[in-house]
Image: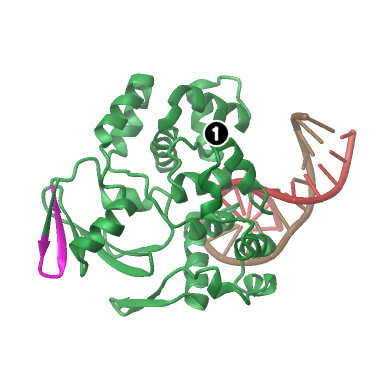
Chain colours: A green, B red, C brown
Amino acid sequence: MEIVPQNRDILIKDIKDFEIDQTLECGQSFHFDRINEDEYIVIAHNRMLRVRRGEKNSLVLYDTSYEEYKSIWEDYFDLGRDYSAIKEYLLSRDERLAPAIEAKYGVRIMHQEFFEMLMSFIISQNKQIPQIKKLVFAISEKWGTYVGTMYGKDYYAFPTPKQLEKVSAQDFKELKTGFRAPYLYDALSKVLDGSISEEGTRELDNEALLNYLCGIKGVGEKVASCVMLFGLSRRDAFPVDVWIKRIMEEMYFENGADKKKIAAFARDRFGEYGGYAQQYLFYYARDGKK
DNA sequence: TCCCAGGAATTCC
DNA sequence: GGAATTCATGGG
């Protein structure tokens, strides 16, 4: 992998184990627009990023700097990590992961922002991905900071807790968040009063962190695990949703298993690489059914 | 009209 | 305790 600054853009050559479309569309992220199969607009860290897949395993990040790439986007897309080692380990744990890993070879686990992940995955319950995206965009447009216009569309960052200080549960409801409105409000309140904070998560081990997050109304094990995996880089978290349950039962439990049992099995089988296994399997399972 | 959606809270037995 | 029901909204 080679990072080549070009004018106002950043060209990254010879990226392995990465595809921008797979990484964005595997279900971990909701705050982006697809321009076409190679080009996306990504909103994160109070910025709008135009990014495009280039020729021969390259990637172009438009209108950014080397410093910004190193300080933000490399970590955001997890480009600094060796995924061949991850894949090798997972395959050594179970070679039956091969079809999922081969099909979704370009997925990386992103490191997104904690608060946005918390709110997004509270929204995600009992919703489909396009609906989740719609609500994330609506909340951003209503309360977030304008970050730029591309192809005629205005983009807004996901609001900070501070920007939502005066927002009520009723305000969330008016955006059609439905029964999730009081959940969003409870999460917001706890972040605003400091009882939930990213700093507060650092010292906690996974089990304690899970309980910590589950103290928020509307946050159960699955949502908490997603926040841990995608927002706090707990790469051993293994969210069990309906898709994962389905494929794990197919692979490992002939007579079915509840979510707790599946999560425990995954901890034992995949260990610190559970999150990667989860995402390959989730995307593979969900895509196959389409 | 009916059914389901990257679930979680509540109610029921 | 664990299983069934409810929750608000949109789309097939």
Identify the residue at horizontal 10%, vertical 69% (top origin). Answer: A7
Which secondary structure dominates the residues rendered in magenta? strand
Q: Position of residue A12 (x, y in %)?
A: 15, 53
Position above or below: A40 against C3? below
Front-most of A35 and A192?
Answer: A192
Q: Is residue C9 left or right of residue A57?
A: right
Identify the residue at horizontal 43%, vertical 31% (top origin). Answer: A272
Front-most of A41 and A128?
Answer: A41
Identify the residue at horizontal 41%, vertical 39% (top origin). Answer: A279
- Quarter of the image where the N terminus of chain A is located: top left
Front-most of A123 and A10?
Answer: A10
At label 1, the amino acid type is Lys
Magenta residues span A5-13
Position above or below: A95 against A187? above
SS at circle 1: helix
Quadrant in the rendering for residue A197: bottom right
